[in-house]
Amino acid sequence: MRVEFPIEVVRARFPALKRAEPFVYFDNAAGAQLPQNVLDAIGSHLLDKNVQRGGRYEKSRAVDHMILSAREKVAAWVNAADPSEVAFGMNATSFIRLVSLAIGQTIEPARNQFILTDLDHEANIATWLVLERFGAEFAWWKMRDDGRLHVEDLPPLLSERTKLVACTAVSHALGSLVDVAAAARAAHSVGAELFLDAVHYGPHAPINVAAWDCDYLVCSGYKAFAPHMGFLWGKRDKLLALPTFRESFIPDEPPYKIEAGTFVFENVAGMSAAIDYFETLGRELDPSNTQRGAIEAAMSAIRSFEQTLSRRMLETLSSVDAIVYGVHDPASVEHRVPTICFNIPRRDPADVVERMAEAGFGIRDGHMYAPRLMDRLGLALDSGAVRVSLVHYNTVDEIERFGNALRKIVH
Ligand SMILES: Cc1ncc(COP(=O)(O)O)c(C=O)c1O
């Protein structure tokens, strides 16, 4: 059964969209807007239970309950085996660093190789490169000229010495999807682990750590219709084995051994509500669904609707002769999400973005925190490219208006 994506219902749930009109949010890869139920969850946490967890009184117990429930919801969202595999914290970068510094302590000369990519956000590169001082060596899984990581290029890099492969599930700059399940199979075939950056993937398609069989995964709430916070998921046995710093009163088990200090409770309440938002959408699309089924139904419907957005945006960019980096054929949108980097020949990206801002579009220019990728694309770090990044509350009509504004600037 194919149901039309309920775009008007979706947009009505994000009050920021109407408030900002006629401004258009096309910079969602840098942070997305929040549905009303997320705003309500943050507000009601701060109003009704803004207290420390672990107390014997009702409000404190309510905070404990909220955290437990948020872990269960995030576990359902990523399809984890157990909520204790989910740790909350500040952001994705600090979790990548926490895991890398822990893994750094377990490097042995016989297994000291890390495989990184030149497509990733620098947060999932530099954070591993610092392990050189602990004896780590590095090999590069390179993007091909089509802007994609091809999984066939991974096995020749792997050996019994490979400790870990760190890669993204989708590029936050070019929008190219990675076959992460195949990457996990390849890594595991030599006894290595797979660390996945799903920060950019989270808002666009169903995460499934069970099917992917990755070992660790990080996400950021603020990219996925929740406030600023991050979480780490890891296989329980991997998290148990991870040497982390903890105070003596913190239990030496996940998630507690992973969570440094107090995190921002109201933002965790918001993350939890963002998953309710997905679940509600999924149940509206298919009322017979279970919780995980509803979340998957929502994320799959989002993925499918976004393919239309990708196609229309690529056609629009082609109509102004933009140079699109990565997957640019509107017939190949199954390989991408609607996050698109481009340049207009002979035009400074900053100038294009400045003029588009005047026309009411929030887009971004620069290196996208991916200096190695810019290098691969032959782009100067100080100018980089223009990026438009759409999510499921964006519309074909917004793309048409964007095209009209861009045409005026280009011609
Ligand atoms: C793909 C990707 N990884 C990592 C990060 C860093 O995330 P955070 O800001 O949560 O540390 C970002 C942020 O833009 C990102 O897009």
Image (cartoon, grey):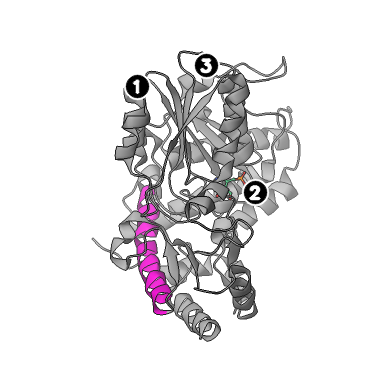
Q: Nearer the viewer, mark 1 or mark 3?
A: 1
- When the figure is inspected, residue 406 is found, relative to residue 231, above or below; the finding is below
Give SS at disc 1. Answer: loop
Chain part drawn in magenta: 296-319
Type of residue at label 1?
Val
In the rendered image, which residue does mark 1 sit on?
190
Q: Residue 304 colored magenta?
A: yes
Type of residue at label 2?
His
Q: State the predominant SS element of the stretch in magenta.
A: helix
Q: Position of residue 151 (x, y in %)?
A: 32, 40
Dot 1 or dot 2, earlier in sequence: 1
The quarter of the displayed image where residue 39 is located: bottom right
Q: Is mark 2 within 8 Å of ligand 1?
A: yes
- When the figure is inspected, residue 136 is found, relative to residue 213, above or below; the finding is above
Q: Is residue 314 left or right of residue 276?
A: left
Give SS at disc 2. Answer: loop
Q: Residue 302 colored magenta?
A: yes
Give SS at disc 3. Answer: helix
In the rendered image, which residue does mark 3 sit on?
241
Type of residue at label 3?
Ala
